[in-house]
């Protein structure tokens, strides 16, 4: 009690304010730093792998190549993705579309359950003169509208050029879902946050391939690192004629296609 | 053509922005519209709006206080809603929401307080018990009601109202921009969107005031000011003409350009949205009220007060439907077609679901209830000056 007697009200308030502001700063800082980069995948890999496995995200820049001429529509990729990433039923991180086109320009497109069970023969009602499959997923665009519109910064780009979602920060407003021209995003009905293809970030940072690439029996899907001189995808991109989806949107997709048709959006 | 293809991107089978996102621009539109009317009196000195000068402020406040509720009900993680303010990501238009909303809330609350300050002090002095405590708290310890102080209040109100006009326009124009800035969606992506939203907001605000004012006067058994209704009808007609012009302009441009997106928008308007767009938004909601208001304005000298009141009341009711239909057609219409541009999905909200019809009705009624409560605490109509005991 004696000590208290010596403290004037002014001093008490002053010290109190100092203590409060110190607490606030201490409180704010540690919350901000991990969360700025945190994602279920990114935080684990960045902190852990850089030291352990020598993974450095500055040494990679990934790209995805799809040769539509090789795709047989078996749906293994969709199944593999669904299992690997626990994708809820009725939602798709990747899917396969089937196109049937006639000489006269009639078009039939479908993707039953995202093509997860393959495709049954159909009758489009016209004489199709060409038909092909187009696997699709998040394009991890360089100038992506989904990151731009995220009001809380939960969608972000990694140094390897990937677009990820921090599900601990996402408020689930759905603005990114609206902003993606490719229909790659959805609101996960279990987590209630935005969800999409991560190119299996948890696998590739361990030197594995994305599940869909691993599962593809024909090599229609290829995953590559543009910073690797000997990379196959890098070489193909440099030498072949390559297409991207909805080029007019200027989002700079990093999923590249061989054998695209004008009917594919 | 579309019937035969009807291909949707698999993730496009779901409508992510539901009825709640229709309610949100509808409510903020009413906020902005009601505020513009109050500014016509407080800033532009339109004396005919004196009877509703204070009432329109309360209307704006009541709707503003509930404007965030549909959003919170829609968010996947409403508990993280404050992230938009704590860690805004400013490249997103949506990140501006917290700032715009808070700023406007402050301006509006201050204005309401200053406009009603003298009344609050009078009530605090005249009442007893709990009521007295409430008014004492509302008075914030300021009991100066000298003519000089009130004159000062009046000046500040004018400044606040002047700041409030661009603030209200921003708050609502921003909502339009949220849609107008999405290049992935051709039905939304137009710089006209914020302007269309703003004008239709003013239409809905004036229409709501016509209805609320007439009901309030009936309830109180007082005469409806003919000048006020006449003025409201005139402004309503003007803003309706501008709104419909803009709405049609957008569609005519799309149709005339015949760009790729017209292939999906044309069937959208004539099939999927034929009822909500052609019947509700354009004919029942726009054409008919336009004729009614034209009669009201042009034949004013031949018109008895009762007929004028009735015509404006009917026109306003239809206009509230029109604006709601417009919000619906923008928000839901923009999601009815897939981004594959090759197919359509359907959306019918259920009655009892979380973001369903009942929730929307409650959210529509809540601001009305709030307005009644606010009007009890701060009686906005001047004739009601009897002390509260």
Image: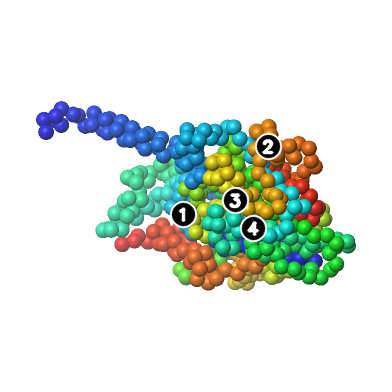
In the picture of the structure, the residue carrying the numbered disc 4 is A76
Let me know if residue A44 appears in the view.
yes
Q: Nearer the viewer, residue B340 or B240?
A: B340
Q: Picture coordinates of residue A30 (x, y %)?
A: 40, 36
Residue at 40% across / 42% down in the picture? Answer: B149
- Answer with the quarter of the image where residue B211 lies: bottom right
Q: Is residue B220 left or right of residue B267?
A: left
- Looking at the rendered image, the disc whose residue lies closer to the viewer, 2 or 1, is 2
Q: Does B322 appear above or below A148? A: below
In the picture of the structure, the residue carrying the numbered disc 3 is A211
Q: How is the image coloured?
A: rainbow
How far apart are the alpha carbons under marks 2 and 4? Answer: 24 Å
Residue at 29% across / 54% down in the picture? Answer: B133
Do residues under tags 1 and 3 come within 8 Å of each other at their CB atoms? no
How far apart are the alpha carbons under marks 2 and 3? Answer: 19 Å
Q: Are marks 1 and 3 on the same chain?
A: no
Q: Picture coordinates of residue B45 (x, y %)?
A: 57, 49
Do residues under tags 2 and 3 come within 8 Å of each other at their CB atoms? no
Q: Is residue A190 left or right of residue B230?
A: left
Q: Are marks 3 and 4 on the same chain?
A: yes
In the picture of the structure, the residue carrying the numbered disc 2 is A231
Mark 3 belongs to which subunit?
A
- Answer with the quarter of the image where residue B327 lies: bottom right
Residue at 64% across / 58% down in the picture? Answer: A76
Q: Picture coordinates of residue A184 (x, y %)?
A: 63, 53
- Looking at the rendered image, the disc whose residue lies closer to the viewer, 1 or 3, is 3
Q: Are marks 2 and 1 on the same chain?
A: no
Q: Residues within 10 Å of mark 2 (few under 14, many from 20)?
A: few
How far apart are the alpha carbons under marks 2 and 1? Answer: 45 Å
Q: Are marks 2 and 3 on the same chain?
A: yes
First of labels 3, 4 by sequence position: 4
């Amino acid at each position: 009690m004696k000590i208290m007697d010596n403290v004037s009200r002014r001093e008490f308030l002053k010290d109190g304010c100092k203590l409060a502001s110190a607490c606030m700063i201490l409180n704010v800082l540690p919350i901000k730093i991990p969360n700025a980069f945190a994602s279920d995948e990114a935080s684990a890999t960045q902190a852990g792998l850089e030291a352990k496995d020598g993974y450095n995200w500055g040494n990679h820049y990934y790209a995805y190549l799809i040769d539509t001429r090789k795709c047989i529509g078996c749906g293994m990729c969709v199944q593999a993705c669904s299992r690997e990433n626990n994708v809820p039923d009725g939602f798709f991180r990747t899917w396969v579309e089937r196109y049937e086109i006639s000489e006269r320009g009639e078009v039939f497109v479908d993707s039953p359950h995202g093509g997860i069970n393959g495709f049954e023969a159909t009758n489009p009602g016209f004489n199709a003169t060409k038909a092909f499959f187009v696997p699709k997923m998040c394009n991890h665009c360089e100038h992506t509208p989904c990151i731009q519109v995220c009001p809380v910064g939960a969608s972000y780009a990694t140094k390897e050029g990937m677009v990820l979602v921090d599900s601990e920060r996402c408020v689930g407003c759905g603005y990114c879902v609206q902003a993606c021209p490719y229909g790659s995003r959805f609101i996960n009905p279990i987590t209630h946050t935005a969800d999409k293809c991560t190119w299996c970030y948890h696998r590739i940072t361990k030197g594995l391939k994305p599940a869909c690439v691993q599962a593809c029996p024909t090599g229609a899907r290829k995953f590559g690192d543009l910073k690797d001189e000997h990379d196959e995808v890098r070489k193909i991109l440099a030498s072949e004629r390559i297409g991207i989806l909805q080029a007019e949107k200027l989002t700079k997709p990093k999923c590249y296609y061989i054998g695209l048709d004008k009917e594919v959006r | 053509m579309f019937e035969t293809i009807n291909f949707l991107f698999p993730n496009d089978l779901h409508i992510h922005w539901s009825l709640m996102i229709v309610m949100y621009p509808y409510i903020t539109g009413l906020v902005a519209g009601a505020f513009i009317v109050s500014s016509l009196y407080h800033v532009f000195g339109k004396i005919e709006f004196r009877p509703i000068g204070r009432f329109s402020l309360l209307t704006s406040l009541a709707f503003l206080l509930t404007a965030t509720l549909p959003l919170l009900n829609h968010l996947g993680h409403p508990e993280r809603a404050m992230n938009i303010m704590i860690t805004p990501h400013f490249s997103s238009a949506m990140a501006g929401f917290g700032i715009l909303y808070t700023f406007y809330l402050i301006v509006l609350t201050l204005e309401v307080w200053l406009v009603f300050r003298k009344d609050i002090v009078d009530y605090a002095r005249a009442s007893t018990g709990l009521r007295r405590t409430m008014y004492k708290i509302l008075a914030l310890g300021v009991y100066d009601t000298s003519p000089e102080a009130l004159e000062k209040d009046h000046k500040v109100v004018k400044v606040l109202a002047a700041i409030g006009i661009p603030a209200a326009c921003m708050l609502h124009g921003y909502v339009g921009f949220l849609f107008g800035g999405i290049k992935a969606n051709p039905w939304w992506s137009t710089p006209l969107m914020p302007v269309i939203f703003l004008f239709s907001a003013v239409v809905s605000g004036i229409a709501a005031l016509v209805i609320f004012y007439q009901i309030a006067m009936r309830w109180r058994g007082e005469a409806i000011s003919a000048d006020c209704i006449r003025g409201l009808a005139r402004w309503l007609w003007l803003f309706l003409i501008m709104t419909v012009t803009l709405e049609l302009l957008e569609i005519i441009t799309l149709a005339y350009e015949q760009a790729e997106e017209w292939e999906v928008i044309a069937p959208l308007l004539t099939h999927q949205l034929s009822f909500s767009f052609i019947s509700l938004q354009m004919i029942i909601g726009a054409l008919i009220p336009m004729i009614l208001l034209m009669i009201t304005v042009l034949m004013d000298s031949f018109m008895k007060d009762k007929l004028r009141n009735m015509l404006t009341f009917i026109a306003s009711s239809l206009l509230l439907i029109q604006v709601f239909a417009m919000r619906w057609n923008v928000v839901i219409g923009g999601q009815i077609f897939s981004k594959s541009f090759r197919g359509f999905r359907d959306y019918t909200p259920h009655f009892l679901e979380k973001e369903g019809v009942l929730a929307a009705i409650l959210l529509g009624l809540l601001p009305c209830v709030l307005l009644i409560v606010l009007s009890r605490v701060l009686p906005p109509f001047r004739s009601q000056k009897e002390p509260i005991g």
